[in-house]
Image: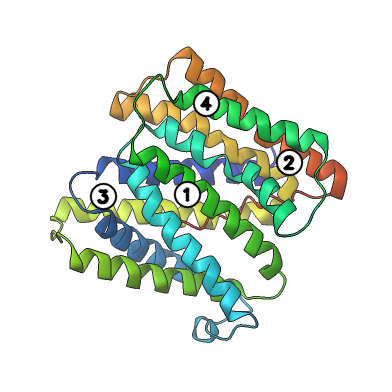
Amino acid sequence: MPNGILLALIAYASYSGSDAVIKSLGGQFTVFEIGFFSTLFAGCFLFFTRPADERWRDFWRMKRPWAVQARAFAGIASGVLSVYAFTHIPLAEVYALIFLAPLLVTILSTVILKEKVGPWRWLAVVAGFAGVMLVVRPGFRELNLGHLAAFVNAFLAATSVILLRSLAQQEKRTSMLGVLVGYGLLFNGVGAASTAFTLPSAMQFVWLAMAGAFTAGGQFMQLLAAKYAPANRIAPTHYSQIVWAVILGALFFQEYPDWLSLVGLAVVGGSGLLTMVREEVRLGTVRWNPFSRTRL
């Protein structure tokens, strides 16, 4: 297996580990407090991953500050909603809804970027939504705010990707990451201070640090993966998180998807892969950036 693909698989396993830790903290802290500490620890680890030709003290120098800040706000809202979703509904259902993001990018690209979308990509969109319906099954089981949070999260992730397309060649990585972390700490800090703040115990600090370390590790592994393999080879590894959702949900949270849910997860993953394959055929590249994860 090429080194880049292996590193990408490790990256998404690390992200899934962070999601599982966050889920385990549900009920112990507010959404804002979990978001604040996980962002804080992730930021501490990511501080050492800046590109050699960039400096953190210059992160505020931006060519398109409003677009960078809009992406940061989308990332902050995505982070809060993802924490809420992970702590209220099964991991597999969260991932099924979040993985609608590449399909929503297709829809948003026709509206915002005026791109032409062919029948294969529309087929992938329809199949993806059908897969989610098999997992969530509205009308056959009770839906709650966790499902809504996960769906809105997917929409925000898609919005972030659209913004990233126009920023990737113009802005520094330190600018996009620095603004995201800074706003994340401020927003979650204010939210935590204005709600029922609970001082974590020593063991809880360890778990919060682990959530941040897993997230930072995922970011770092993605950066390494990009050095060894092109994005269009790495992008499909994103869907390995579906497997981790089933494994971690069963091992630690007694969440056992039935056969319909497993079929739905497979359809969601397949539709996302079809979208990427068609983009590679059409443009020679994958427009869904596997390194666009905004949640910290």
Say which of marks 3 and 4 sits in front: 4
Report the residue marked by disc 3: 207
User: From what the image shows, is residue 180 above or below residue 53?
Assistant: above
- Which of labels 3 and 2 is toward the front? 2
Query: Disc 2 on helix, strand or loop?
Result: helix
Crowd around label 1: few <14 · some 14–19 · many ≥20 (10 Å): many
Q: Residue 14 at what x, y percent from top left?
A: 46, 45
Disc 1 from disc 2: Cα separation: 20 Å
Give the amino acid type for the residue marked by disc 2 in the picture: Met
Can you say whether 83 is above or below 61 in the image?
above
Mark 2 lies on residue: 276
The answer, for residue 167, to whether it is visible in the render is yes
Residue 12 x, y percent position in the rendering: 52, 43
Task: State the residue position of label 1.
Answer: 153
The earlier-in-sequence mark between 1 and 3 is 1
Label 2 to label 4: alpha-carbon separation: 21 Å
The reply to whether dot 1 and dot 3 touch (C-beta < 8 Å) is no
Q: CA distance from mark 3 to mark 4?
A: 33 Å
- Cα separation, mark 4 vs mark 1, equals 17 Å
* 94 horizontally vs 50: left or right: left
Residue type indicated by callout 1? Asn
State the residue position of label 4: 133
